Image (cartoon, rainbow, N blue to C red):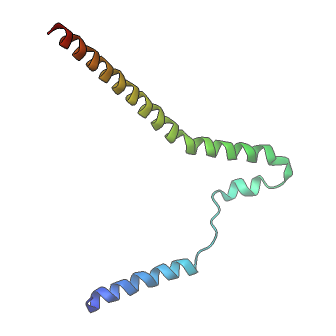
Amino acid sequence: MNFSSNRRVWFVLGILVLCLLLQTVAMACPTCQAGLEGAEHENIKRGYFWSILFMMGMPFAIFTGIGGYMYLEVRKARRREEKSDGQSNARS
């Protein structure tokens, strides 16, 4: 390793250590958190929780549905191909 490469590695490591030492906890939505403090808003908090889970799960559900549909279509096409090959062999 030459001097400039070694220096670059130490610089990146220094920045990484600095970021780790200066980190703080980030609040996702300070307005919502301040407005929903207290026991009287438990249903709204539960609603936010479930809506976030729903939004996070939707891409997986959509891609699974599309992938399952494509898999079934390929299976149908292969069966049709095998059936047509079987019929053409019987005629020959």
Q: Residue at x 58, y 79 (%)?
A: 22
Farthest residue, direction bottom = 3
Q: Residue at x 75, y 58 (%)?
A: 34
Q: Is residue 66 above or below residue 47?
A: above
Give the quarter of the image for residue 54.
Answer: top right
Q: Is residue 46 above or below residue 84?
A: below
Quadrant of image for the N terminus? bottom left
Quadrant of image for the C terminus? top left
Farthest residue, direction top = 91
Farthest residue, direction right = 39
Q: Position of residue 6 (x, y in %)?
A: 32, 88
Q: Residue at x 76, y 53 (%)?
A: 35
Q: Position of residue 30 (x, y in %)?
A: 68, 59
Could you tell whether 88 is left or right of 55 in the image?
left
Could you tell whether 58 is left or right of 81 in the image?
right
Q: Position of residue 87 (x, y in %)?
A: 23, 11
Could you tell whether 13 is left or right of 7 in the image?
right
Looking at the image, which is closer to me, 34 or 71?
Answer: 71
Give the quarter of the image for residue 11.
Answer: bottom left
Could you tell whether 22 is left or right of 8 in the image?
right
Q: Is residue 46 above or below residue 66?
A: below
Q: Is residue 22 above or below residue 6?
A: above
Farthest residue, direction left = 92
Number of marks drawn? 0
Q: Position of residue 78 (x, y in %)?
A: 30, 23
